[in-house]
Amino acid sequence: GLGEVLWDLLPGGRQLGGAPANFAYHAHALGAESLVVSRVGRDDLGRDLLERLNALGLSTSGIAVDPVAPTGSVSVTLDPTGKPAYTIHLDVAWDFLETDPEGLRAAAGADAVCFGTLAQRHPVARESIRRVLEATRPDALRIFDINLRQRFWSREVIVESLALATVLKMNDEELPILAELLGWPAEDDDRLLARLAERFDLRAVALTRGAQGSLLWTAGRCWSWPGSDLKVVDTVGAGDSYTAALALGLLSGKAPEDILRIAHRVADFVCTQPGATPPMPADFASELVGTRKTEGDSSESRS
């Protein structure tokens, strides 16, 4: 998970947050070896965040400590349906993410890297993220989870990120914005996914649609999965858990229908739990853990 790591300040208390960190946690919970590449402040929130990551079983070797900027935080409010709204604080440690030999070595060995737009709001972090992505192997999954938050994105950042990606994940609020930015007319969702895959040479494009389920374009066609009737506690982290399941499903060569089924099972569970990183049922990992797609290599997938 490459980019922001922070505290989500939820109505019920603070929770580990940041889409890349959530992705790394869920990939780990689903059976992968995971690493967060980010930056925290030299403050109490930073120390607590590192302790929290360690408690979740995640390595903190990819997280630097900034001597000046504070640890990132986001104030989160929930509407009656559990949908979150965010106030994202500026000039925090992950805005000044820098590349180092440890991060570049991790990128070179990774099977999948997940990144988004939010951590690219500052030019320092944006350049570092691009350097890490460029250090990955050609066959690695470079997952662009677009995550359009407030004003922290631009057409330039989105198009350049799509050019670096091999997989795109977005939700049904982000797809029409992306289509408009690219100057495309309104079309059915499946046709837009196919256009995106062709235009940016993407291996897969996933679209989550809340209670309406999701679509996955891969292998030359679009696959769909229906939504579920859930008692939602909150949806924080659910999309990131979906992305983690998607990544492991693609890496293990599962059929598209199986990837969607498992991704929905995982995300549905997260929706019924408080916070972005709840303990995950042990049987989820058994459905997803697979070998790397390199011939003759039987090592665990690394995200």
Image (cartoon, grey):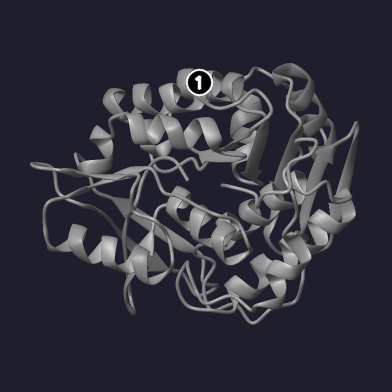
Query: How crowded is the residue under tag 1: few (<14 C-alpha within 10 Å), some, or many (20+)?
Result: some
Q: Is residue 219 above or below residue 299?
A: above
Q: Is residue 68 above or below residue 183?
A: below
Residue 151 appears in the rendering: no
Question: In the image as oriented, which residue stretches furthest toward the front?
Answer: 296
> Quarter of the image holding residue 57?
bottom left
Please state if 59 lies on the left or on the right of 44 as rendered: right
> Quarter of the image holding residue 121?
top left
Pick the residue in front: 4 or 35: 35
Please state if 58 lies on the left or on the right of 230 as rendered: left
Q: Which residue is mark 1?
A: 134
Residue drawn at x 78%, y 66% as measured from the top left: 287
Residue drawn at x 35%, y 44% as measured from the top left: 62
Residue 167 lies, in percent from the top left, at 67, 34
Pick the residue in front: 303 or 87: 303
Residue 230 lies, in percent from the top left, at 69, 78
Residue 264 lies, in percent from the top left, at 74, 64
Question: In the image as oriented, which residue stretches furthest toward the left?
Answer: 68
Residue 204 appears in the rendering: yes
Residue drawn at x 37%, y 71% as measured from the top left: 55
Residue 10 lies, in percent from the top left, at 34, 70
Secondary structure beneath dot 1 equals helix
For badge 1, the amino acid type reads: Glu
Residue drawn at x 65%, y 66% as measured from the top left: 267
Please state if 263 lies on the left or on the right of 4 as rendered: right
Pick the residue in front: 153 or 3: 3
How many tags in the picture?
Answer: 1
Please state if 81 lies on the left or on the right of 265 as rendered: left
